[in-house]
Image: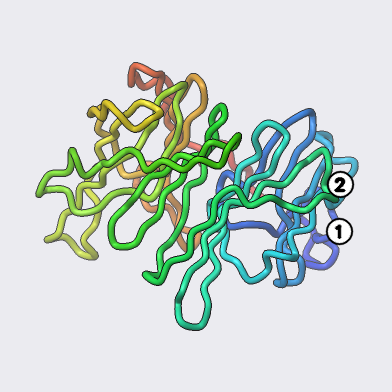
Amino acid sequence: LHYNEKDSEQRALCNAYISGLDYEAAIFYTNQKVYTFQNQNDSHFDLIELTPDGTSRKTAISLSSLKNSYTGDGVVIHRGHLYLLTSYYDENRNTEINIWQYSLDKPESKPKSIYTSTRNDSPVAMALKAFGNHLYFMIWDGTMSYYQVDVRNAKVTQIFDIAQVQSPEIYDQNFNIAILGTTLINELIHMDMSAPNNSATFSTIYTANLDGSHIQKWIEVENDPYTADQKYFYRWTMWSGGKLLSESPHIRIYNKEGDLLVDHDPLQDIPDY
C-alpha cells in the first residue's frame, strides 16, 4: 500500500516512512526496539524509536545541537548508547572531529564527547564500529589512519597500518572497516588505471587482530560494500543513481573461513507494482 500512495505528504505520515541518513546501516535493533534517523526539514536529524510491528514511533533523542556537523556513516548503537562520529568544518576548512555518546536510557541527559580532535587538513572521519569496550573508526587526510577508542577511559590508540601490505599495483583502499567475530576486516581495492574512470577490478580483503596486529590476506572478491557480524561476512551489489553497478546483482555471505555460503540475486525478490 505504501508504494501505491502518490501523495508525498500522505506517504510521510506512515509509521514506516523514514527520510534519514543516506547510509545502509543507519537502522538498529536493540532491546526489542528499532532505531533509525529522521530528517527534520533539512535542519538536522533526530534518532527515532519504533516498535518492531510498526504500530508506534517517537523521537528518542534530538540531535539538533549537531545540525552543522557531518555524520555520514559514523553511527552506531552499542550497549545502551548511541555513538555519533561527527566532523564540523568552519569557513577556513578547519575541522573539529568528535565522537559523541548519548544514553538511550537517559535521552534527556547531555551527550558526552569521548574523542575530540581539531585539525586544519580537511580530514574526513568515517566508518564507526563498536566491539566490547572499544570503538573503531578511520580518518582520511590523503592517507588512511585507523583508531581504537576505549569508551571506559577515552584512551585513543592508532592501529592497523594497512600500508604495511600495500603493493605498487594497488591504487586505493576502501573507506570501510568491519568486525567479524573478534577480527578486524579491511580491503584494498585494485584499480585498472587504463580503464575508463579508473574502474576497480577486484579487492583483496585483509584481516587483523582487534589491536591492529597480525595483518594478513584473507580472500579476493569483487569491489562491493560490506559488513560483518559475529559469524558472517556480508557483501552486496552497489547502486548509484538508481542503477546497479554490476552485471550480476548479488548478496553474498561468507563464513569466518572465507567459504561462500550464499550467492543470491536480490532482484528476484522485488515485486512488480
Q: CA distance from mark 2 to mark 1?
A: 11 Å
Q: Which residue is mark 2?
A: 57
Disc 1 marks a residue whose amino acid type is Leu
Q: Is the residue 130 above or below the residue 88 in the image?
A: above
Which quadrant of the view contains residue 64?
Answer: bottom right
Residue 15 visible, this angle: no
Query: x and y percent of residue 240 in the render?
Result: 45, 59
Query: x and y percent of residue 18 in the render?
Result: 73, 55
Query: x and y percent of residue 228 in the render?
Result: 47, 30
Query: x and y percent of residue 61 in the render?
Result: 79, 52
Q: Residue at x 53, y 63 (%)?
A: 87
Q: Residue at x 70, y 72 (%)?
A: 42
Which quadrant of the view contains residue 44?
Answer: bottom right
- Mark 2 vs mark 1: in front: 2
Disc 2 marks a residue whose amino acid type is Arg
Q: Is the residue 232 above or below the residue 115 in the image?
A: above
Mark on residue 13? 1
Residue 124 visible, this angle: yes
In depth, the one of 224 and 93 nearer the eye is 93
